[in-house]
Structures are given as C-alpha cells and as structure tokens.
Image (cartoon, rainbow, N blue to C red):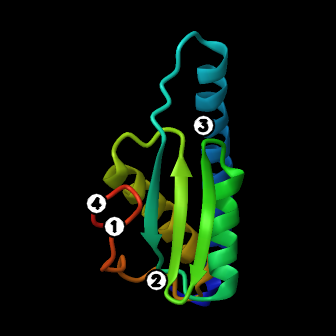
Amino acid sequence: MNLLNWPFRWLRFVLQYVWLLIESNVIVGWDIVTPGTKMDAGIVRLPLRCSTDLEITLFANLISLTPGTLTLSVQNDPPVLYVHGMYAPDRDEFRAELYEHEAKLLKAMRRDGDPGPIPVAHQTGPEGGAA
C-alpha cells in the first residue's frame, strides 16, 4: 500500500468504528430494555501488535468507548491489554474480535498498512486458559 491511499484507509476505519459504535449501542440498549439478560461477561489477556504509545493508547481508548467493552489494564513492555467484555462467553472468539479491530486500526495508522502477525502469548490469562 502506498502513501496515497493512507487517507482513505483512515476514512474507512472511522466509518467502520462508527458502525461498531452503533451496533454495540443497539445490543447493549436492547439488553437493558428487554427482560432477562444475554450478558455473559469475561476478561481476556490480549498481547498486542500495537507498538507505539500512540497506537496502544488509541486502541485501549477505542475499546473503552465501545459499549460492552472496557480496558481494565495496560502494559507497555511487552504491549498487553486486559479487556472486559459484557458479551464474551467464548474467550477465544472475543479475543479474535479484538484482534480484528486492532488490525483495522493499525491498517489505518501505519503508512504501509501492515498490522503484522498476531503475537504468540506465553503466559496464562486471568480466565485460566492460555492467552
């Protein structure tokens, strides 16, 4: 990817994030106004591809701004987030969704548009399984 399409990647990311905000608000709002709940909360340890302070901060804040998710803790070296999800019955699926959002952000932020490979985790997360 070249420098000329960088602004278009930013615009695409912003539109995708706005759609995610709308979708998340509808899901959480519907769960609030209907009887019962579909909430199945969980916490995941998420080793990041984000490498700069700006990338880590932006991703952590975008997670917290999205209804139903919250960044609980940030570690810079190596970059790791602990993320709470209101609707995370399958931790691996939740982690995969977060990695998908991280890739979209990094494609928009990095001039070459390459988010890089998903990091290999060597530690155990708070949910008791391998991260």
The residue at 54%/52% (across/down) is 84
The alpha-carbon separation of the residues under discs 3 and 2 comes to 26 Å
Q: Residues within 10 Å of mark 4 (few under 14, many from 20)?
A: few
The alpha-carbon separation of the residues under discs 1 and 4 comes to 6 Å
The quadrant holding residue 29 is top right
Q: Nearer the viewer, mark 2 or mark 1?
A: 1
Q: Is residue 75 above or below residue 13?
A: below
Q: Could you say where residue 91 lies in the image, as x and y percent from the top left? A: 36, 51
Please report contact status of discs 3 and 2: CB closer than 8 Å, yes or no: no
Q: Is residue 62 above or below residue 26?
A: below
**Residue closer to the observer: 82 or 55:** 82
- Whichever of labels 1 and 3 marks the residue nearer the N terminus, that label is 3
Q: Is residue 110 above or below residue 46?
A: below
Q: Which residue is mark 2?
A: 114
- At label 4, which amino acid type do we have? Gly
- At label 3, which amino acid type do we have? Glu
User: Relative to residue 97, is residue 75 drawn left or right?
Assistant: right
Q: Residues within 10 Å of mark 3 (few under 14, many from 20)?
A: some
Q: Nearer the viewer, mark 1 or mark 4?
A: 4
Please report contact status of discs 1 and 4: CB closer than 8 Å, yes or no: yes
- At label 1, which amino acid type do we have? Ala
Q: Is residue 40 visible?
A: yes
- Whichever of labels 4 and 3 marks the residue nearer the N terminus, that label is 3
Q: Nearer the viewer, mark 4 or mark 3?
A: 4
Image quarter (top left, top right, bottom left or bottom right) of the C terminus? bottom left
Q: Nearer the viewer, mark 4 or mark 2?
A: 4
Q: Which residue is mark 4?
A: 129
The alpha-carbon separation of the residues under discs 2 and 1 comes to 23 Å
Helix, strand or loop at label 2? It is loop
Q: Which residue is mark 3?
A: 23
